[in-house]
């Protein structure tokens, strides 16, 4: 671990990152409108490794707008002369779905321009590709799967069906028992900084919503082994047994509603410490468990939500099973929603790719939802002058305004930055399917109250790291397919979900190359959730890839070293998908009184249409799921197309 990073490692990370960084801006020049980097044969962002997600070069214009410096050096915008029926800002699932819904209402001849600041389409739904020897390995750079805590709406289900995805067929593609059949189980990594010793111990509980999706309840044997091996205090061991088995009512004499009202107002960490008097080691052990769902730990998750998520301590409290006031939607179990699950090897990037196929068939070869998995996108077709729909990447919308008063204007004008220049295009309407925090900076004419509501949608920062390994024999030796690591940089990692589909074959033998998925949420325990997100976002923007690579190598070596893992030998490539603006902020009974006590939600103010401008994105429902991105696109299209 301590040896310097060699050139091979350098190529795997830093150098390729630089390649990604220079790609959009350096190749864009005055001829950008006619050519542009996307037209090059070699333009293929899914295969880039290093720092991806919000990659270098993708956010400079937006941050300069935020800082009030953009127009100082932007120069006079150049008019492209282009006139569209609709311009959509944001090429994520919401923006692409909006283009699709709009064509359904207005007709296939509608002229649509989609702008996105990244070098690839899909927004959070990004595809990562790796070649390890002869093997193609896919990873999800963001949006993991079709899943949602509440059932998909008929609109979202309808779109999924139209794209040819048969959600019920998922069991055909997943080798659900592969890891268990090889003796692998979810584990917990106790680190020496937090627990006094580095130790990998079999984990007795996995939280719903983790990417490993292996939530099989463990039997008594596993609990016994866990109690015997976990490096926690003796008292913590006893307290854990008590929490799971004692069935104590901590609020005797109160009705179920009164208990829920109390639980909605305290964090699960306080519940464990102050109400259930659990040992500090238990709090430390559970601290990061809800990271994959909320991007914060148990200090910022209400005890009522922890009850909904089946965390220990509530069995004796005689709580009525109905959801309590102020519960987070992720914490409300729903059987129908649980069954509606589909994971493509590149996550919901397959949905984005299927949408692109519908909008611009020449850009995405193939016929079915299965064959899209191995289809090679042709980026040169995305922005063709003869095409009804054009997707313009590497283009940040910097100003959206009505030409005239918003109530009577016939057109909107959108200015966008691309390759160091600013261009304008016009349209009859615009849909802002981008992150809500950006909108106040690009659409100055919105009412102040709406801008404030938009700005409150602080997104949850995350790292989704994919590490391509040459083999996973060390996992097999350790008997682990995943590790929850409450004290480490990435608080979860797991072997890729074994899905084979459309000619794509997952790794089945430990000697084969595989992708390991790692997740970090850079939170700051003890502060309100929005502050944690703000600080975490700053951390992600200021951490170099080199530092992240070190952390990754160190963590894998410390966890899997006893199984023979050697980072220098076993790591083939690393892609860190950095999402400083990640999940949509979901309301939380600890910090959002309107969510607990009632009242207008900020997202319902934020998404109000304004003249010819409508607002979509998952942020518009404060719900970090693909169905929300689709539903909000549908609503926005309805608003601008109604007579
Ligand atoms: C790491 C991660 C994992 C997730 N996993 C899941 C999952 O498993 N299942 C699930 O249902 N949901 C998941 N989500 C939630 C995900 O956000 C939604 O499912 C969905 O992909 C959001 O789509 P969207 O179009 O609303 O937003 P986005 O995907 O964020 O797309 C918005 C796009 O607008 C662009 N944009 C912003 N400002 C501008 C501008 N000024 N000009 C041009 N473009 C701009 C952004 O860069 C982005 O590309 C995950 C999110 C993250 C971050």
Image (cartoon, rainbow, N blue to C red):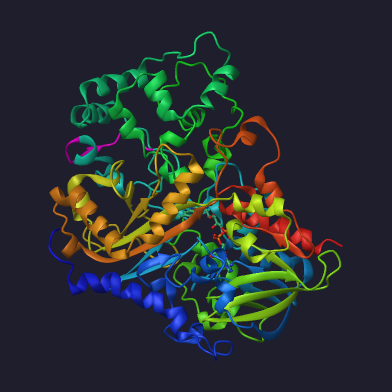
Q: Residue at x 53, y 19 (%)?
A: 319
Foreground pick, 517 / 615: 615
Foreground pick, 45 / 500: 45
Looking at the image, can residue 135 be seen?
Answer: no
289 relative position to 36: left or right: left
Question: In the figure, residue 114 lies in which quadrant?
Answer: bottom right
Q: Main secondary structure of the magenta part?
A: loop
The quadrant in which the N terminus is found is: bottom left
The quadrant in which the C terminus is found is: bottom right
Number of numbered tags placed on the structure image: 0
Q: Position of residue 151 (x, y in %)?
A: 61, 43
Foreground pick, 127 / 262: 262
Q: Position of residue 423 (x, y in %)?
A: 63, 81
Looking at the image, can residue 127 be seen?
Answer: yes
Can residue 197 be found in the magenta stretch? yes
Q: Residue at x 27, y 19 (%)?
A: 238
Q: Residue at x 78, y 69 (%)?
A: 106
Q: Position of residue 280 (x, y in %)?
A: 30, 27
Ligand 1 positioned in quadrant: bottom right
Instruction: State whether residue 391 is above or below residue 300.
Output: below
Q: Position of residue 184 (x, y in %)?
A: 26, 44
170 relative position to 329: left or right: left
404 relative position to 367: left or right: right
Instruction: State whether residue 409 is above or below residue 75.
Output: above
Residue bounds of the magenta highlight: 196-206
């Amino acid at each position: 671990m301590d040896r310097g990073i060699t050139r091979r490692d350098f190529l795997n990370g830093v150098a390729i990152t630089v390649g990604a960084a220079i790609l959009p801006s350096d190749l864009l020049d005055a001829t950008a409108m006619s050519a542009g980097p996307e037209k090059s044969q070699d333009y293929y962002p899914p295969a880039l490794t290093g720092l991806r997600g919000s990659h270098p070069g993708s956010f400079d214009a937006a941050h300069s707008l935020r800082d009030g410096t953009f127009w100082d050096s932007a120069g006079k915008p150049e008019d492209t002369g282009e006139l569209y029926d609709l311009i959509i800002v944001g090429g994520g699932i919401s923006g692409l779905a909006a283009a699709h819904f709009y064509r359904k209402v207005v007709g296939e001849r509608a002229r649509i321009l989609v702008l996105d600041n990244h070098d690839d389409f899909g927004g959070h739904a990004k595809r990562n590709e790796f070649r390890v020897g002869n093997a193609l390995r896919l990873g999800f750079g963001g949006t993991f799967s079709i899943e949602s805590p509440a059932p998909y709406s008929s609109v979202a289900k309808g779109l999924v069906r139209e794209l040819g995805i048969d959600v019920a067929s998922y069991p055909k593609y997943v080798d659900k028992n592969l890891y268990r059949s090889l003796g692998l189980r979810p584990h917990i990594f106790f680190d020496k900084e937090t627990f006094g010793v580095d130790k990998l111990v079999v984990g007795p509980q996995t939280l719903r919503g983790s990417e490993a999706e292996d939530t099989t309840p463990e039997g008594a044997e596993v609990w016994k082994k866990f109690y015997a091996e976990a490096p926690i205090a003796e008292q913590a061991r006893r307290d854990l047994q008590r929490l799971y088995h004692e069935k104590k009512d901590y609020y005797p004499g109160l009705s179920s509603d009164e208990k829920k009202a109390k639980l909605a107002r305290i964090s699960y960490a306080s519940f464990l410490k102050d109400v259930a008097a659990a040992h500090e080691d238990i709090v430390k052990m559970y601290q990061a468990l809800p990271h994959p769902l909320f991007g914060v730990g148990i200090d910022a998750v209400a005890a009522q939500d922890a009850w909904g998520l089946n965390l220990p301590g509530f069995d004796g409290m005689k709580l009525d099973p109905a959801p309590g006031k102020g519960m987070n939607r992720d914490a409300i179990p729903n059987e129908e929603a649980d069954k509606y699950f589909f994971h493509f090897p590149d996550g919901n990037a397959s949905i984005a790719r299927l949408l692109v196929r519908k909008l611009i068939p020449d850009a995405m070869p193939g016929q079915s939802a299965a064959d899209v998995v191995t289809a090679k996108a042709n980026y040169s077709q995305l922005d063709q002058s003869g095409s009804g729909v054009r997707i313009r990447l590497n283009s940040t919308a910097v100003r959206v305004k009505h030409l005239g008063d918003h109530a009577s204007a016939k057109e909107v004008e959108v200015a966008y930055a691309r390759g160091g220049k600013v261009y304008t295009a016009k349209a009859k309407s615009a849909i802002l399917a981008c992150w809500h925090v950006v909108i106040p900076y690009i659409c100055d004419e919105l009412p102040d109250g709406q801008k404030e509501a938009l700005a409150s949608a602080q997104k949850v920062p995350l790292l989704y790291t994919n590490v391509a390994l040459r083999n996973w024999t060390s996992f097999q030796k350790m008997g682990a397919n995943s590790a929850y690591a409450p004290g480490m940089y990435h608080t979860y990692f797991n072997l890729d979900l074994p899905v084979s589909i459309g000619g794509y074959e997952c790794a089945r033998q430990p000697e084969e190359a595989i992708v390991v998925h790692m997740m970090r949420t850079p939170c700051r325990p003890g502060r309100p959730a929005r502050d944690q997100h703000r600080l975490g976002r700053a951390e992600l923007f200021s951490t170099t890839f080199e530092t992240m690579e070190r952390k990754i190598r160190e963590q894998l070596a410390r966890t899997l070293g006893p199984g023979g893992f050697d980072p220098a030998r076993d790591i083939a490539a690393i892609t860190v998908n950095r999402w400083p603006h990640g999940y949509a902020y979901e309301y939380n009974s600890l910090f959002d009184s309107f969510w607990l006590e009632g009242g207008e939600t900020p997202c319902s103010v934020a998404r109000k249409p304004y003249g010819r401008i409508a607002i979509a994105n998952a942020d518009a429902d404060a719900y970090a799921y693909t169905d929300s991105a689709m539903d909000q696109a549908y609503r926005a299209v309805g608003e601008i197309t109604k007579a």
